[in-house]
Image: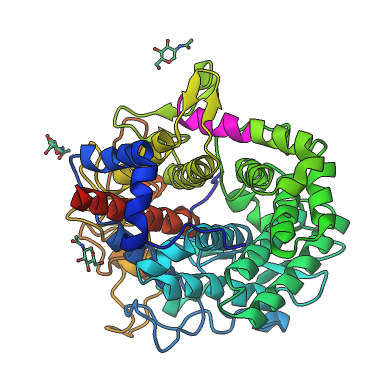
């Protein structure tokens, strides 16, 4: 990112024989889903979008690349990360178009990939992508295991934005500072400890049946990290000054601590974590904050939706009904805000004329992507429990939530005034000058001649040509409030992609593919 930015509870797998009789039981619901899919003029290949979004995570890999690396224009990089501190910090993900490894957004990325697998693992598997999805999670969690060197020490960042941004180099040529930064007892970071705990707890659920030993290891780290973050309170940007102009924790650490407790409760069933979520609900803002965005910084909406699932899924949680209902009220606020069904314009997310949810200029797509995820998850929850979303301006059927999430995804994929897919490499037209160092310079595999810091700016950054490498599956920052998009490498507000943009879409693509397959089955059955 450039400067100053500011369980397995899955649906049944697609199964034609089982599905057809169900269709007639829930005919009206399915007919409306069916109509979601026949009413659009453009049909998108969600399976293709899913596969591509997972490729993106391979392009962002730091460290030694494995034999089965599919993005072949990349090579090993950052192979001495942590050396000067005496820690092995090789691996993990580059955050965006630069080469800093920022721990907080990386952890959020992994939490969202894991949540996607927890909700839609069967659908991802049906699309043949489960292995790649698990690899995308593991590339992050393997790194978090290395970065968590002691119960109360977490390495939070490698490299820094200021020196990184002086250079326009391929990751394979990097000559910028690779200094590593940590949080510990004296220099706390409850937000990054909390988010990393959430990521590892969620990943432990995703890995539970596929790799029980690894799942257990992740859970162990998650529990220690939560304890560390809770016991030594403080914002990580107070401890690590260099992160301030890039990923300052504006919402503080209370949302991450609630988020971590909730994921740990889901992973362990330990009442201690549930009680934390309940007891701190008020003082940590969990039942107080009504928000219209969900991001690497602000987790409240995610917590509120997940807490609502507890309320609806588990009867024995009745003793906490009152607090969980307060969480639900705020989840409803978020969803109604996306659906334009709260009272007053300020309480609703602005929609562009082209129909895109618009939160702010810089990297708006991150909010579109997280909203699509929460809308999809909530719609499924309502459908499973036979409910509607109650908003100040009326109640909304679950199908309408799905339909709106689909409209946001379709906007991303090309159904927009620019007729452009903002998912790179998808469809006939997509951004060609993505603000991405590696993609914009000739592949190291093709030309191993060293490209220096300013040489990259002089010879590659300013070119008018398309990037030599297509960073397939990256979701760029996207258009402005007029649906306008300028495909220029220097326009990083719009043309830079981040790992946390694409992560929530993985599960959504798989769910939309399943719904589309179901609607095809329905057509065939008539
Ligand atoms: C969708 O894309 C995949 C490749 O990712 C391809 O195999 C499949 O045939 C496509 N489906 C349609 C209906 O075009
Ligand atoms: C709400 O927004 C619409 C469209 O931007 C505008 O026309 C209308 O005046 C606004 N209403 C209020 C009460 O601000
Ligand atoms: C997008 O496609 C529509 C329909 O084909 C066309 O009317 C419109 O001019 C196109 N817009 C751009 C910016 O290419």
Q: How is the image coloured?
A: rainbow
Q: Residue at x 61, y 43 (%)?
A: 305
Q: 44 above or below 329? A: below
Nearer to the camera, 220 or 440:
220
* Residue closest to the eye, 265 or 142: 265
* Looking at the image, residue 377 lies above or below residue 201: above
255 to 287, vertically: above or below: below
Magenta highlight range: 330-340
Residue that appears at 20% across and 60% down: 465
Residue 351 position within the rendered picture, expressed as x and y whole percent measured from the top left: 39, 28
For residue 152, above or below residue 257 = below
Would residue 429 be found to the left or right of residue 449 on screen? left
Quarter of the image where ligand 3 sits: top left
Q: Nearer the viewer, residue 389 or 164?
A: 389
- The chief SS type of the magenta part is helix
Residue 52 appears left or right of 329: left
The answer to whether one can see residue 92 in this image is no
Q: Residue 418 in the image: state x and y as whole percent.
A: 22, 40
From the viewer's perspective, tell me whether residue 227 is left or right of residue 194.
Answer: right
> Residue sitting at 63 percent across and 67 percent down?
205
The residue located at (49%, 19%) in the rendering is: 394
- Whole-percent x, y for residue 66 in the image: 45, 86
Q: Position of residue 368 (x, y in %)?
A: 43, 42
The verdict on residue 55 being magenta is no
């Amino acid at each position: 990112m450039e400067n100053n930015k500011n369980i397995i509870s899955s649906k049944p797998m697609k199964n034609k024989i089982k599905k057809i009789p169900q269709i007639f039981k829930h005919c009206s619901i399915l007919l409306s889903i069916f109509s979601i899919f026949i009413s659009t003029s453009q049909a998108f290949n969600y399976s293709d979008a899913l596969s591509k979004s997972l490729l993106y995570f391979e392009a962002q890999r730091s460290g030694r690349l494995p034999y089965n690396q599919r993005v072949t224009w990349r090579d090993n990089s950052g192979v001495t990360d942590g050396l000067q501190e005496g820690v092995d910090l090789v691996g993990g993900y580059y955050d965006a178009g630069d080469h800093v490894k920022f721990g907080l957004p990386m952890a959020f990325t992994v939490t969202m990939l894991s949540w996607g697998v927890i909700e839609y693992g069967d659908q991802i598997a049906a699309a043949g992508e489960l292995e790649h999805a698990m690899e995308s999670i593991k590339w992050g969690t393997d790194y978090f295991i290395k970065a968590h060197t002691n119960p109360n020490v977490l390495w939070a960042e490698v490299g820094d934005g200021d020196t990184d941004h002086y250079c326009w180099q391929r990751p394979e040529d990097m000559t910028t500072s690779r200094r590593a930064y940590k949080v510990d007892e004296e220099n706390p970071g409850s937000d990054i400890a909390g988010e990393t705990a959430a990521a590892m707890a969620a990943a432990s659920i995703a890995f539970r049946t596929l790799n029980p030993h690894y799942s257990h290891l992740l859970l162990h780290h998650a529990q220690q990290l939560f304890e560390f973050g809770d016991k030594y309170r403080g914002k990580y940007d107070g401890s690590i000054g260099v992160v301030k102009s890039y990923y300052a924790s504006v919402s503080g650490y209370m949302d991450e601590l609630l988020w971590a407790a909730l994921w740990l409760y889901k992973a362990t069933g330990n009442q201690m974590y549930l009680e934390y979520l309940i007891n701190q609900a008020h003082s940590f803002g969990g039942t107080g904050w009504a928000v219209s965005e969900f991001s690497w910084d602000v987790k409240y909406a995610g917590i509120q939706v997940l807490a609502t699932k507890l309320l609806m899924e588990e009867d024995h949680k009745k003793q906490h009904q009152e607090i969980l209902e307060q969480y639900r009220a705020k989840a409803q606020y978020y969803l109604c805000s996306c659906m334009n069904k709260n009272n007053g314009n300020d309480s609703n997310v602005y929609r562009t004329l082209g129909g895109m949810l618009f939160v702010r200029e810089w990297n708006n797509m991150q909010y579109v992507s997280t909203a699509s995820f929460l809308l999809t998850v909530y719609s499924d929850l309502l459908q499973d429990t036979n409910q509607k979303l109650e908003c100040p301006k009326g109640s909304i059927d679950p199908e309408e939530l799905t339909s709106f999430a689909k409209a946001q995804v379709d906007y991303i994929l090309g159904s927009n005034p620019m007729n452009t897919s903002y998912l790179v490499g998808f469809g006939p037209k997509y951004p060609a000058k993505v603000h991405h160092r590696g993609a914009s310079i000739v592949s190291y595999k093709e030309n191993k001649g060293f490209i220096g810091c300013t040489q990259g700016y002089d010879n590659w950054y300013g070119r008018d040509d398309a990037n030599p490498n297509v960073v397939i599956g990256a979701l760029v920052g996207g258009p402005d409030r007029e649906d306008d998009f300028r495909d220029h490498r220097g326009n990083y507000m719009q043309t830079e992609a981040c790992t946390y943009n694409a992560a929530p879409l993985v599960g959504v693509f798989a769910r939309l593919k399943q719904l589309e397959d179901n609607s095809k089955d329905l057509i065939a059955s008539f």
